[in-house]
Amino acid sequence: MINKTAAIIAAAGMGHRLGANLPKALVKLLDKTLVEHAVANLSPVCELIIVTAPSGYEAEYSKILGDQVEVITGGVLRSDSIRLAISKIPAKYEYVLVHDAARALASTTLASSVLSQLIQGEQAVVPALNVIDTIKEVDAKGYVRNTLDRSALKVIQTPQGFTRSVLERAHMASEDATDDAALVEALGIAVKVIAGEDGALKITTPSDLAAGIRLLIPDSSKNYKVGIGVDAHAFTADKNRKLSLAGLIWEDEIGLDGHSDGDVASHAICDALLSAADLGDLGSNFGVAEAKYEGATGAQMLSESLAKVKEAGFKIENVSVQIVGNRPKIAPRRAEAISALSKALSGAKVSVSATSTDGLGFTGEGKGLSAIATALLVSA
Ligand code: CTP
Ligand code: MG
């Protein structure tokens, strides 16, 4: 089991203030709807995602989100939606991230920072930004009552993270709250505040939507570099060698030969990263036969490649890998593979696909596996 984290994405609101004549979560932000962005950003760190949909829209949500998420009917108020979603989370999940589809662009890195605080023992964690404007309390007649001390104020965002038991207790009382942490505070439990991000802005009005689009458009002042990588390994005759592929161990599958763990998907990504940064390839950087890389895991090679790419002044924009072979079937573990690869790359966006080759070539004949990857880097 890679992690025990479930996420609830609240997406059952109608988006009256946006006024798009359809639920806000179905509004498009460039290539994807808000809810698709939110799912894509959280899926690398969560094993289970529950999305709340407005009544009557469940099938439409399921259609665009596919079988990687569970869509349930939301409630009248946001807290009703969250309460319904909590009841659907199986007992094995220890941590729950609660997120708004309206904060569609909150990054995987932010979700992963929230989660790591929970793993370190916090019970409730919220991301927050400093307040830029002066905040005043104003009475009903329109006169200033007083000016608040800005230095102690924060703007709270999502995803918020909770241990499952604390979140359950917080939502036991049927109170309404637009913020889950507020219910936890009411129980007297400490809520840890961590640094939020501009990207986690809440899309409420048409001008927020325009701000979201601006965040997605590539910055022309930056330097973008693309790289490609390919790897192939033969299936082994060693019955004790397990298959390592896309950062996962595949029990009951034939392993791949290799000096390291033979993870073709991870190696293809490493080559793509190194080539994009103009740093040569796996062999020239790590020495394929070097003793220290004997049995090295794909995750280890990915982390080391990332360190080199960072040192060269780049950040990963996204990585995409396609595995070529007859088996294993990738789809049932795609989310897990994305999560493992993304984790090894410090939360970078990763996509994983697979294909067979219609019986042709060494992969079609079942002699081994190959993988091809691309990486897009941006100057940091
Ligand atoms: N939400 C929900 N269930 C509800 C109401 C809201 O899951 N009964 C979700 C929304 O889909 C949104 C998040 O809670 O992602 C935050 O709510 P908000 O931004 O207010 O969205 P809407 O309620 O859709 O917008 P509006 O208030 O403008 O109608
Ligand atoms: Mg609302």
Image: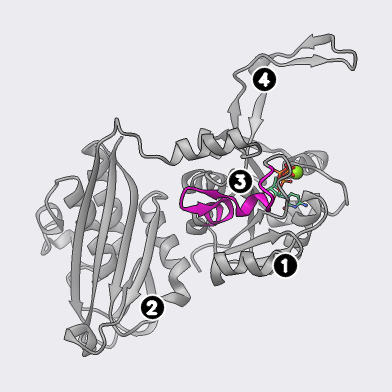
Front residue of 143/185: it is 143
Spatial separation of the CA atoms under disc 4 and disc 2:
50 Å
Question: What type is the residue that disc 1 sits on?
Answer: Lys
Question: What percent of the width, then of the height, locates residue 1?
Answer: 51, 69
Q: Which disc, if any, is residue 88? A: 1
Q: Is residue 185 above or below residue 133?
A: below
* Precedes in sequence: disc 4 or disc 2: 4
* Image quarter of the C terminus: top left
Instruction: Locate residue 355 relative to residue 175 in the image: left or right.
Output: left
| Amino acid under disc 4 | Ala
Where is residue 348? Give x, y as percent. 39, 50
Q: Which residue is at the front of the view, 109 or 124?
A: 109
Q: Calculate the distance from the C-alpha at mark 1 to the C-alpha at mark 3.
A: 19 Å
Compare residues 333 and 351 and report the one nearer the observer. 351
Q: Earlier in the sequence, mark 1 or mark 4?
A: 1
Q: Give whichever of discs 1 and 2 has the lower sequence position.
A: 1
Q: Residue at x 40, y 40 (%)?
A: 217
Badge 1: few (under 14), some or many (20 or more) residues near its Cα, within 10 Å? few
Question: Which residues are drawn in magenta?
Answer: 19-39
Circle nearer the viewer, 1 or 2: 1
Mark toward the viewer: 2 or 3: 3
Residue 152 — which label?
Answer: 4
Specify whether residue 372 is in view: yes
Query: How far is the residue under mark 3 from the one under mark 4?
Result: 21 Å
Do labels 1 and 3 touch, CB within 8 Å? Answer: no
**The image quarter in which residue 367 lies:** bottom left
> For mark 4, does the 10 Å Cα neighbourhood hold few (<14), some (14 to 19), or many (20 or more) residues?
few
Residue under numbered circle 3: 159
Question: What residue lies at 57% left-to-right and 39% top-to-bottom?
Answer: 209
Within 10 Å of the Cα at label 2, are there few (<14), some (14-19), or many (20+) other Cα atoms?
some
Task: State the SS at label 3.
Answer: loop
Amino acid type at image mark 3: Pro
